[in-house]
Image (cartoon, grey):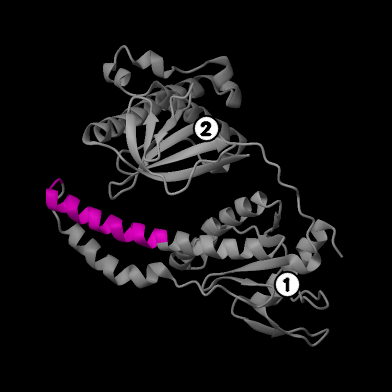
């Protein structure tokens, strides 16, 4: 199994300059290779085998003309080539993912990945880490490295407000035993735009809607930013203020979702959720702000890896399963149910059903059926 730990790093001025230069070189190489790959792709029209029959240029082929590429980590440039190859592979396997796009200095995230070769990435002291080309750098080691893990790679990134982080990937042998869930340890979660989710026991986490709380202050600071002259130092200072507000809200959301997913994982042995298209849900029902605020997709990711780390399971039910329209008592299907109907009475068994709780119970029952548990 693989696990990644993220730490805050504090580069010196010279190291920060080299990191920023590497960001730019990686972006440059990515765009050059993508441009050449598109040219080869349009000539051949052979599909996914394009990289096997007619290989585009490699990062080394650009170093003669672009001498400054020799100053940065060569493995970071090689990973940029692999990212282009992966983007084309994903496109051919799933065209709905979109055709590979060029990277922008202002739109895309500032980061690059380098690999560990013969100990080029290693911890020197409790507060220093050695990286290729950067040598020793101060690190905030808030948690120790895993004892049985093999250090594979490191990704250096920079946040919009200017902080630097490193994400270190470890590979280790897992001795986790799969847990056979019991019926009373299986729970269903139905998505709710207001409270994040409703479980099959009628509970909800009461998501505090963090973006809504920070919206007024954020609008005030963004208004100031829009009035600053482009290219000025005051505009950059105001941009950092806005970035700090966004980052604070994102960190609060991530903290809430980590705690919610940990509570669920510690209590239950299997969790059943619905495979929802969150992008379409945000666009079609005028719920974009609430949908993006609660971070349901992030909760799904957290649940998946935390359950797998304990040998437990996350069951994803098909999005077309009628969880809301089916009575959880007698399985009667109410085809005339609308989104406005929050409570409805089953005409067969007479059960009065809460829409969200009923859907969560149906998801739990479907999860039990998939697991083969009566």
* Image x and y of residue 94, in percent: 60, 39
Please give left or right for residue 219 compared with residue 232 in the image.
right
Tally of numbered discs: 2
- Look at the picture and state if 26 lies above or below 183: above
Magenta stretch in the rendered image? 231-251
Residue receiving disc 1: 361
Find residue 127 and report its image quarter.
top left
Q: Looking at the image, is mark 1 or mark 2 earlier in the sequence?
A: 2
Secondary structure under the numbered disc 1 in the rendered image = helix
Q: Main secondary structure of the magenta part?
A: helix
Q: Position of residue 234 (x, y in %)?
A: 13, 53
- Report the residue at 77% width, 86% height from top: 351
Instruction: Examine the rendered structure and indicate whether residue 31 appears above or below residue 141.
Output: above
User: Would residue 249 appear left or right of 171 to someone viewing this image?
Assistant: left
Residue 248 within the segment the image draws in magenta: yes
Q: Which mark is residue 86?
A: none
Q: Would residue 108 be seen by someone viewing this image from the given angle?
A: no
Residue furthest right as drawn: 374
Q: Quadrant of the N terminus?
A: top right
Against 200, is 225 above or below?
A: above
At x 78%, y 67%, the residue is 365
In the rendered structure, the answer to whether residue 340 lies left or right of residue 236 reads right
Q: Residue 346: x and y, percent? A: 77, 83
CA separation in Å, label 1 and label 2:
43 Å
Compare residues 218 and 97 and report the one nearer the observer: 218
Secondary structure at numbered mark 2: strand
Q: Residue at x 47, y 29 (%)?
A: 84
Question: Does the image show residue 374?
Answer: yes
- Tell me the residue that label 2 is attached to: 151
- Give the camera-side residue of 19 and 232: 19
Q: Are marks 1 and 2 in contact (CB under 8 Å)?
A: no
Q: Is residue 139 magenta?
A: no
């Amino acid at each position: 199994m693989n696990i990644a730990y993220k730490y805050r790093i504090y580069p010196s001025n010279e190291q920060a300059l080299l990191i920023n230069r590497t960001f730019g070189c990686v972006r440059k190489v990515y765009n050059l290779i993508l441009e050449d790959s598109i040219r080869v792709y349009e000539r051949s029209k052979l599909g996914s085998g394009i990289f096997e029959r007619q290989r585009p240029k490699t990062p080394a082929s650009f170093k003669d003309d672009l001498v400054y590429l020799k100053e940065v980590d060569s493995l970071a440039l090689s990973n940029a080539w692999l990212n282009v190859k992966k983007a084309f592979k994903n496109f051919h396997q799933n065209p709905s993912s979109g055709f590979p796009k060029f990277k922008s200095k202002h739109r895309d995230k500032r980061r690059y990945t380098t690999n560990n070769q013969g100990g080029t990435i290693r911890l020197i002291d409790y507060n220093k880490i050695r990286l290729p080309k950067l040598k020793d750098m101060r690190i905030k080691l808030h948690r120790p490295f895993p004892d049985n893990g093999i250090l594979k790679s490191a990704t250096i990134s920079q946040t919009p407000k200017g902080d630097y982080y490193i994400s270190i990937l470890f590979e280790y042998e897992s001795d986790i035993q799969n847990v056979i869930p019991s019926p009373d340890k299986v729970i269903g979660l139905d998505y709710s735009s207001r409270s994040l989710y409703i479980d099959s026991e009628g509970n909800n986490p009461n998501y505090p809607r963090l973006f809504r709380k920070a919206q007024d202050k954020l609008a005030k600071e963004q208004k100031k930013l829009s009035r600053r002259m482009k290219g000025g130092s005051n505009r950059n200072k105001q941009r950092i203020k806005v970035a700090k507000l966004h980052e604070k809200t994102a960190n609060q959301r991530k903290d809430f979702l980590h705690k919610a997913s940990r509570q669920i994982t510690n209590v239950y042995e299997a969790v059943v959720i619905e495979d929802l298209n969150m992008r379409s849900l945000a666009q079609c029902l005028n719920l974009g702000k609430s949908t993006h605020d609660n971070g349901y997709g992030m909760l799904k990711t957290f649940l998946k890896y935390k359950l797998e780390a304990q040998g437990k399971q996350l069951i994803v039910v098909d999005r077309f399963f009628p969880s809301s329209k089916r009575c959880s008592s007698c399985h009667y299907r109410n085809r005339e149910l609308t989104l406005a109907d929050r409570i409805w009475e089953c005409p067969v068994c007479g059960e009065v059903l809460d829409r969200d709780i009923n859907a969560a119970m149906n998801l739990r029952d479907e999860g039990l059926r998939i697991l083969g548990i009566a």
